[in-house]
Image (cartoon, rainbow, N blue to C red):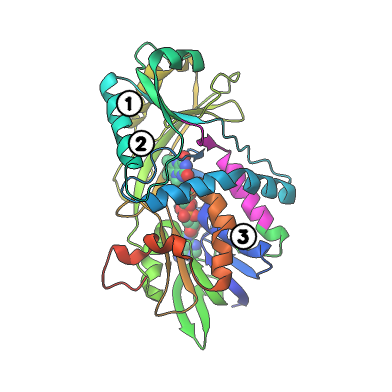
Amino acid sequence: MKREESEFAVIGGGLVGAAIAWGLARLGKQVAMLDEGDIAWRASRGNFALVWVQSKGLGMPAYAAWTRRSSDGWAAFADALGEETAIDVAFRRPGGFALCLSEAELEARAAAMHRLHNQPDMIPYPYEVVHRERLRALLPAIGPEVAGGIFSPLDGHCNSLRLLRALHAGLQRRGGKYLSEHVVDRIEQRQGMFALATSAGEVRAARVVLAAGNGNARLAPMVGLAAPVRPQRGQVIVTERVEPFLHHPMLSVRQTDEGTVMIGSSTEEVGFDDHVGAPVLAAMAARAIRIFPCLGRLNVVRTWAALRVMSPDGFPIYSQSMTHAGAFLATCHSGVTLAANHALVLPPMLEAGSLGTELAAFGGKRFDVSAHG
Ligand SMILES: Cc1cc2nc3c(=O)[nH]c(=O)nc-3n(C[C@H](O)[C@H](O)[C@H](O)COP(=O)(O)OP(=O)(O)OC[C@H]3O[C@@H](n4cnc5c(N)ncnc54)[C@H](O)[C@@H]3O)c2cc1C
């Protein structure tokens, strides 16, 4: 069996691992990114591609600030990726809407935004409650039941499949290694080096970053960390391509840069099961048609389900090990939105060997007082 050695081993080749690995490679670090093969649980291949700020952070203002920072950094991040790889990840930030189908729904959503912005330590960001009449001028295609919505100019979207491809291409252009079919089974620290036992031989590295999505739950305790993440299923519908008519992304409907319309995404607690089901898809489609009746005339070309990586409180986990110096963990359920931070903000901290104070609130030990993360 062959043996690889590098400065950093990043476990997981999804959006979180790939963004971190590319960011480390840009800092001149030798990076090996270990991944499973084509068949794997991989949220990064099945998401809704929003770069979304509004409504994030109720219960943890630090998350709102972290999200906003990533959203603000996204344009420069997309440009840098484009320059290095010639892949356009189609990032746009025209502002986004969360649309409501009744006055009661609108009031509840507006109240939640109010609570979010009233939290101590919350750094407010721009948003407004838009009522039906004004909304009709902005989104002429809305149906008669739409009561209004919340708009934030900070919300955007991208092409997240191209994002994943660009991060992988960028990593490899910078000399980073992508080790597919390297399923990490065990991690041990010996004489200051991490030894990763994989299905394709041993990989050794001075530092290790656990970015294995739902796989982190099993790997984290091997380096004294905690990642009590669970899968949460989301189903998505995609229609045929049509002329651009939706110029803003929305929480459950968006038109992609390629012209298709995505309708999403359910939230289902079903464990490791990524099957689609007609009842959930039908409910999603029915709501989308009430919002935009013209969607009822479009052909559906594909549906799929993918598994989110969800922590107990829904917020990201960023930890460094107190028992295994040089081991770090990163996981979140908004890996598209946070990709700019993972690529540009996190890597200098990893290079310095310590996560910044900005990340103190995100440690894994908030879930378990006996954990060291
Ligand atoms: C339906 C849906 C809609 C979503 N919509 C959005 C959205 O609009 N905006 C947004 O920001 N986010 C969204 N997300 C979330 C986003 O997709 C995830 O946060 C992100 O993809 C997580 O990336 P990850 O790299 O942590 O995990 P994953 O993509 O799951 O990747 C984990 C990787 O680790 C590898 N791995 C696991 N175990 C091992 C091991 N032992 N050894 C080696 N490799 C291993 C796997 O093979 C995989 O490649 C959505 C997710 C879903 C499912």
Which quarter of the figure has residue 276? top left
- Tell me if residue 46 can be seen: yes
Q: Check disc 3 and report the residue beneath it.
A: 23
Taking the image as shown, residue 103 lies to the left or right of residue 18, namely left
Image quadrant holding the C terminus, namely bottom left
Lower position in the chain sequence, tag 1 or tag 2: 2
**Residue 146, numbered circle:** none
| Residue picked out by circle 2 | 266
Which residue is painted at 42% across and 74% down in the image? 321
Dot 3 falls on a residue whose secondary structure is helix
For marks 1 and 3 on the same chain, the one whose residue lies earlier in the sequence:
3
Horizontal side of 75 relative to 120 (left or right) equals right
| Within-10-Å neighbours for mark 1: few <14, some 14–19, many 20+ | few
Tell me: is circle 2 under 8 Å from ligand 1: yes
Picture residue at 44% right of the left edge, 61% below the top: 359
**Residue type at the position of mark 2:** Ser
Magenta residues span 152-170
User: Foreground: 329 or 41?
Assistant: 329
The local secondary structure at tag 1 comes to helix
Q: Is residue 303 magenta?
A: no
* Residue 9 shown left or right of residue 297 in the figure: right
Quarter of the image for residue 369 reads: bottom left
Task: Answer whether labels 1 and 2 touch (C-beta < 8 Å).
Answer: yes
Pointer 2: residues within 10 angstroms few (<14), some, or many (20+)?
A: some
- Classify residue 115 by image quadrant: top left
Query: For the point 34% across and 74% down, which residue is it?
Result: 372
What residue is shown with label 1? Answer: 283
Q: Which quarter shows the N terminus?
A: bottom right
- Name the mark nearer the viewer: 2 or 3: 3
Assess disc 3: are there few (<14), some (14-19) or many (≥20) residues with their C-alpha within 10 Å of its C-alpha.
many
Q: Position of residue 295 (x, y in %)?
A: 46, 18
